Amino acid sequence: MPATEDGTKRLLDFFVYGMLRAAESLGNAPLFMRAVVEQGLRKFMLVNLPTFRESNNATEACDAFTKAADASGLFDGSDSVFRGDADTVHAEIGDRCPYRRVCTTRHDEELPVHCIRTFALAEMLRIRLDADFDWQLNRFGRPCQITLTRSRWRKN
Amino acid sequence: MTDVWSRLEETIEELSHVTDIKSAAVVRRDGLVVTHTLPEGVDPKIVAAMTAAIVGTSEMATIQLSQGRFVRAIVESDHGKLLSLGAGEEALLVALVYDDANLGLVLMAMERAAKQVERILQDGSSA
């Protein structure tokens, strides 16, 4: 185990940055990251988020998921805000995101910013609501602004 | 107006009726299945993810080897062939064909279907 909190953060940066670069070198970062997050959530969601109870409303589900992650000590979700309705979520994620350092590094290197938090939200919605959501990082900044929209590709 | 999913389903049904094509699917580039005619016993989610991986890796190999634009990927095996190609910026088309298939005919049908999928998605975006 890393000896310090900073060591844990640097280890996270190391693995996330490495995974993103590896995914890009294989030609499909979204597929790779989606698969990683999906498998992780399927395995650990029950263990790590025991208080999470989803709603059929996507905005409420994202909010509940983030609060449950916060309550379980995974990350500080107090700077995350979700607005919208059952089909569209407008999210703002602030400075306390644990992935911000990796995203900033990639942004500084002029590489695409793949928002791990949003991959997780979209996969959570897919697993728990059985609904596909397309998402877009509208702005990388303080806060990051993201929109998740129910996919038009899915059978109604 | 018919929704995007229904129009995609019609396209894939039509493609599946082409001689030598066993089954087909439209998948998203991030590996999610949209619609398919794959047989029972085949997991469409796995096919979708594999197709996205095959095309992504093939596209990257094409770039790294300076071979110009990626056109399609063909996986040949004992009992048939798996053909996959892009259908616009967001989607991929995949077909499972018989081992002795007339590839010219199949590819022509697939390219037509891929253009149709691209048009449907463009219409859906602008609607």
Image (cartoon, coloured by chain):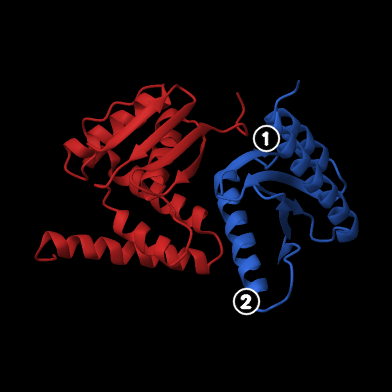
Q: Which chain is red?
A: A
> CA gap, disc 1 to disc 2?
32 Å
- Tell me: B24 left or right of A12: right
Q: Which residue is mark 2?
A: B64
Which-is-in-front pick, marks 1 and 2?
1
Pointer 1 indicates a residue of which chain? B
Image spot of residue B64 (x, y percent): 62, 76
Q: Quadrant of the N terminus of chain A?
A: bottom left
Seen from this angle, which residue lies furthest bottom? Answer: B65
Side of A33 relative to B61 (left or right): left
Residue on which the image places disc 1: B125
Q: Colour of chain B?
A: blue
Q: Earlier in the sequence, mark 1 or mark 2?
A: 2
Residue at the (44%, 46%) spot, across then down: A139
Task: Give the x, y percent position of residue B93.
Answer: 71, 49
Residue shown at 51%/69% (left/top)?
Answer: A25
**Residue name at image x 56 percent, y 49 percent:** B31
Residue at (45, 50) in percent of width and height: A34
